[in-house]
Amino acid sequence: MTAQTVAKPGGQGREHSAPVPFGHFKDVHQAFLRAGAAPLVAIESISFDLAAGSLVTLLGPSGCGKTTFLKIVAGLIPATSGTVQINGRDVTEPHPDFGVVFQQANLMPWRRVVDNVLFPMEILRRSDAAARERARELLALVGLEGFEQSYPSQLSGGMQQRVALCRALIHQPKLLLMDEPFGALDELTRMEMQDLLLDIRAKTGATTMFVTHSISEAVYISDVVVVFSKRPAVIADSIAVDLPYPREARVRYSAGFTALEHRAGRALGITR
Amino acid sequence: MMSRNLQTTIYPLAGVAVILVAWEVYVQAFGVSRIVLPGPIDILNASIKNWPVLLRETWPTFLESLLGFALAVVIGVPVAVCVANSRILNLTLYPILIATQSVPKVAIAPIILVWFGLGLQSKLVIAFLVAFFPIVVDTAAGMRATPLGLLELARSLRASPMQIFAKVQFPAALPFIFAGAKVAVTLAVIGAVIGEFVGSVGGLGNLLLTANSQLDSPLAWAALIWLSVLGIALFGAVVIAERLVMPWADVGHH
């Protein structure tokens, strides 16, 4: 028991009888070293658990460290200190069970749409006929049937981000990490994409961590909204969203929705 | 309304036509000696009269340029890939590359001729030397200009360095490589002609020198024009290759 605790420093102090949460983050701290200046503390201390199958948004002002936190969870940058566990394992590097959607669609202009979607399968050496079929299905799911053979430059921003979403889902990740994926889209396209995300989530059941600075987006799509403070980030509030599923645009105008937005706004310090 | 395609053909031709007419009028009106400046009609006549010679002499110049350019691509691209991906190789090779580039090619041409003789090889080497640098510089720039988002995506999937190179870095660098190739191919023709000027038994450069020394200016000018046609043809071939290799660059934007 003691040996186990030593071997897994992240497991210290946790009840072994309690079910292991899908994601477990404890005292995550991040400081960037800067030449000729004091280290920049991006994240003071963040701790929360991520339930399997849930959709959690990280909501916070620009530059508050929420993207940094997402990249730490993705294994793209190591945390300065603290515990980051997914499925009971310390995250030290990216994992094929993760799918990442970035702020920019990051499509490869030289690949046709379907080949962009298949890119992860090629890297994981699982690109076969079944993968191709799944790529086709995913593209149909996001409303891009008929565009399989197009080049990214022939698509609008919203369509490109749909392709990026398919690419993140093609290898059936257990954890979907989304870094302000709809931030560059216009308001109407953005609302469409939110409905699409809810739809996809209902179909795939992937646990999702979603970074945004839009209050209404956070409330609309989430099970839990984790509100980050200004840098250096701590958790200002953790809001359980009890709006019913399936969510439809109508819910945006309900009293419950507004109350949740208000609470998030208070946590962000933009209203009282 | 003229179609866009028609416009892109007609306007350049019109520009050339205006210059040719003005040139001919000037030569005729002022009675300029054809040794000093032959008119377009003189040059055309010289071209027609001497076409077997011109055609025969184009071949070696074409081969020298093409092979020198091809060698520059075959050697330059891998060198650039190594230089861009290895700090040590970058520090070791880059100063040498810049030093060799700063030596005037005309100045080393006689030495190259001593080493490789009067035939094709020496011209090929000089063409290679002038074409090499832009290929290396542009390819290296392209290898370093891979969009960070794509590298992060590849990293999030734990792609191997080889996969990152083959599937991300290299295709992303292709526009840069072709930009370098377009400069290099025209320089290769210049390199070949430099070699022919310094010492040769054939080629358009050789023909130009010979015609000039015999005061046969129309033929010298004809050789000059064939040289530029050769340069344009090689440039066009690179453009066609670019379109074949990068079909995505050609599709309409949204």
Image: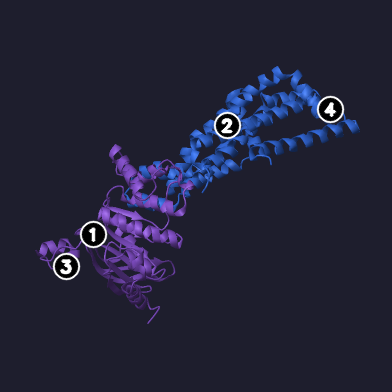
Q: Amino acid at mark 3?
A: Gln
Q: Amino acid at mark 2?
A: Ala
Q: Which mark is residue B35?
A: 4
Task: Say whether residue B110 is visible.
Answer: no
Q: Amino acid at mark 1?
A: Gly
SS at badge 4: loop
Q: Give the label, 4 or 3, closer to the camera.
A: 3
* Contact (Cβ within 8 Å) of mark 2 with mark 3: no
Quadrant position of the N terminus of chain A in the picture: bottom left
SS at badge 2: helix
Asked whether, in this view, residue B40 is left or right of residue B121, the answer is right
Residue A72 image point, x, y percent: 31, 61
Residue identifier under label 3: A12
* C-alpha separation, residue under disc 4 versus residue under disc 3: 96 Å
* Contact (Cβ within 8 Å) of mark 2 with mark 1: no
Q: Are marks 4 and 3 on the same chain?
A: no
Q: Residue at x 43, y 51 (%)?
A: A160
Q: Which mark is residue B237?
A: 2
**Chain letter of disc 2 in the image:** B
Q: Are marks 1 and 4 on the same chain?
A: no
Rendered hue of chain B is blue
Rendered hue of chain A is purple
**Chain letter of disc 4 in the image:** B
Which mark is first along the chain, 2 or 4? 4
**Chain letter of disc 1 in the image:** A
SS at badge 3: loop
**Crowding at label 1, few (<14), some or many (≥20) Cα neighbours within 10 Å?**
some
Residue identifier under label 1: A53
Place residue B115 in its image quadrant.
Answer: top right
